[in-house]
Amino acid sequence: MKIAPSIQKGNILIELSHITFHYHDSLALKDFSATFEDGRAYCLMGPNGCGKSTLFRILNGLSFPESGTYQLDGEEITGKKLKNEDFSREFHKKLGFVFQNPEVQLFSKTVEDEIAFGPLQLGWPKERIREEVDRYLELLNLTDLRYRAPFHMSGGEQKRCALASILIMNPQVLMLDEPVNGLDEDGEAAMIEFLKSMKSPDRTMIIATHRREIAEALADEVLHMTKEHTLEGCY
């Protein structure tokens, strides 16, 4: 597989070591280990049921491994630590996750409100919020939809809205689950070009996809997950 030219490697930001996880009697991840470095873009590839969604849940602190460890920026992430409000706030500020189906994360009355929600919760000054909301409306071609209810938009528009609501928070880690799923050809091309523009030495990107062309366009490294719920290798 041809992969986009690698950028200079950075420090290890995320380290997963010998992770195992079951849903009841169903194995989701088995002795899974991987590292993700500062400023690099990774694509997770593999068949349905190989554990990509479980991996994202663990990275986002929504599920916790039965065995093995997850470290973010040198700090082990556990359920006990995330019960601490200050720790949890700092943890979630570092991570941004865009679901495959954006409807599950959109809840505000308008696109503008959706993008402003995170900064409002963090107490940003109103003028800064207005400026940043306007910026991301323009970046993602949503300006004409700023007063539209997210639930009354197309799938592609919803994806852009969800992405804007995450990017405005400037997360250190951006995770995307099948970012072009459900988009038409023009929408796919526009999303790929936008994500290329978002690559930065200050941001780690982790993208789950079935599509080789997405990996070729965006990835510095490809991690191939198998039906045995392990990591086959990096390319």
Image (cartoon, helix red, strand yellow):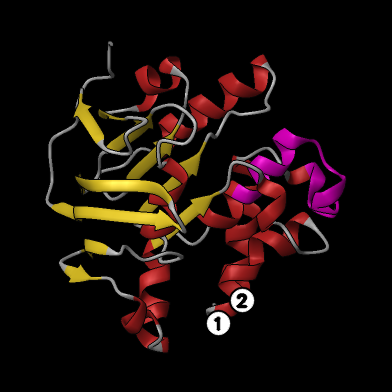
The relative height of residue 86 versus residue 227 in the rendered view (above or below) is below
Check disc 2 and report the residue beneath it.
120
Quarter placement of the N terminus? top left
In the rendered structure, which amino acid carries the disc numbered 2?
Leu
Instruction: Tell me the crowding category of disc 1: few under 14, some 14 to 19, or many 20 or more residues within 10 angstroms, Cα based.
Output: few
Q: Position of residue 23 (x, y in %)?
A: 46, 56
Instruction: Inspect the magenta stretch and tell me whether residue 151 lies in it.
Output: yes
Q: Secondary structure at mark 1?
A: loop
Which residues fall within the magenta stretch? 144-162
Assign the C terminus to one quadrant of the image. top left
Q: Residue at x 63, y 76 (%)?
A: 126
Apparent side of residue 149 relative to residue 50 in the rendered image (left or right):
right
- Residue 47, compared with residue 134, is above or below; it is above
Location of residue 11 in the rendering, given as x and y in whole percent from the top left corner? 12, 51
Q: Which mark is residue 85?
A: none
| Left or right: where 153 falls relative to 123 | right
- Quarter holding residue 87: bottom left
- Disc 1 residue type (three-letter): Gly
Q: Which residue is mark 1?
A: 123
Q: Is residue 90 magenta?
A: no
Q: Position of residue 180 (x, y in %)?
A: 58, 28
Question: Could you tell me what secondary structure mostly forms the magenta stretch?
Answer: helix
What residue do we see at 75% from left, 62% from top? 107
